[in-house]
């Protein structure tokens, strides 16, 4: 495939529809359980982005909407007990991991990213949800274990093969089949 052809700019309504779909997909990646809440929050983010459009005249609607979505999520995480410099990737990642570790199902499913106050027990669960580093990897002097394939390699596959007649029997079948083919060939000529 060659380079992609430049795309024509979308009409204003279609560009905002695309922005809505992108923001909704981005929020869906955080796994909120309530589809109604997801749709409402996405609509609020798009409305806020449309209000900010005059301040950023050169920005595409998708980029502007995603900037507002990041600010929205960051503000919600701050209200939920994860303050910090949101420009730092580590702070943003830690907060989103806490959100994923806490889980979004159950009684808090309708509260994620909503404008309602964050319940104290949900904020406490978010604050206590941390990932701890795993153990350090180190070299071991342990010998490798033999591979096991679920059958015994030492026993013969067929008890009749134990006497060593298997190759002789195979050769006999081969000679017999070849002889049969030769007899059929001679009879048909």
Image (cartoon, rainbow, N blue to C red):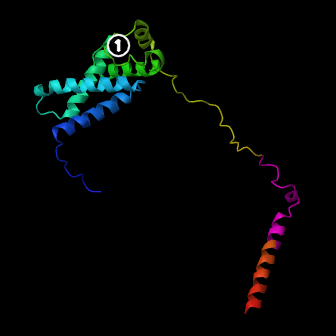
Residue 141 as seen in the image, left or right of residue 122: right
Badge 1, how many Cα within 10 Å: few under 14, some, many 20+? many
User: Could you tell me residue 177's position as x and y percent?
Assistant: 78, 77
Whether the magenta-drawn stretch holds residue 169 is answered as yes
Say which element carries label 1: loop
**Magenta stretch in the rendered image:** 152-172
User: Could you tell me residue 115's position as x and y percent?
Assistant: 30, 15
Residue 16 or residue 101, whichever sits in front: 16
Whether the magenta-drawn stretch holds residue 182 is answered as no
Work out whether residue 131 can be spotted.
Answer: no
Residue 74 as seen in the image, left or right of residue 170: left
Residue 186 or residue 36, whichever sits in front: 36
User: Could you tell me residue 65's position as x and y percent?
Assistant: 23, 29
Q: Quadrant of residue 127?
A: top left
Residue 60 lies, with reference to residue 97, above or below; the image says below
Residue 178 lies, with reference to residue 7, above or below; the image says below
Q: Which residue is mark 1?
A: 82
Residue under the point 17% across and 27% down: 50
Residue 141 lies, with reference to residue 9, above or below; the image says above
Which residue appears farthest toward the bottom when viewing the image?
Answer: 189
Q: Quadrant of residue 140?
A: top right
Residue 26 as seen in the image, left or right of residue 13: right
Residue 166 as seen in the image, left or right of residue 30: right
Residue under the point 78% across and 46% down: 152
């Amino acid at each position: 495939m060659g380079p992609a052809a430049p795309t024509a700019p979308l009409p204003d309504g279609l560009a905002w529809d695309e922005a809505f779909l992108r923001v909704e997909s981005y929020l869906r990646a955080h796994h909120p359980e309530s589809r109604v809440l997801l749709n409402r929050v996405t609509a609020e983010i798009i409305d806020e982005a449309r209000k900010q459009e005059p301040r950023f005249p050169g920005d595409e609607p998708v980029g502007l909407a995603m900037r507002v979505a990041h600010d929205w999520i960051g503000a919600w995480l701050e209200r939920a007990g994860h303050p910090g410099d949101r420009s730092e990737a580590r702070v943003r990642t830690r907060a989103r991991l806490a959100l994923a570790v806490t889980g979004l199902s159950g009684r808090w499913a309708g509260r994620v990213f909503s404008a309602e106050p964050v319940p104290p027990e949900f904020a406490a669960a978010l604050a206590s949800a941390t990932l701890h580093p795993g153990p350090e990897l180190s070299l071991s002097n342990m010998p490798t274990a033999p591979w096991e394939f679920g059958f015994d390699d030492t026993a013969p596959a067929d008890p009749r093969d134990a006497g060593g007649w298997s190759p002789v029997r195979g050769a006999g079948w081969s000679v017999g089949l070849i002889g049969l083919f030769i007899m059929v060939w001679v009879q048909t000529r």
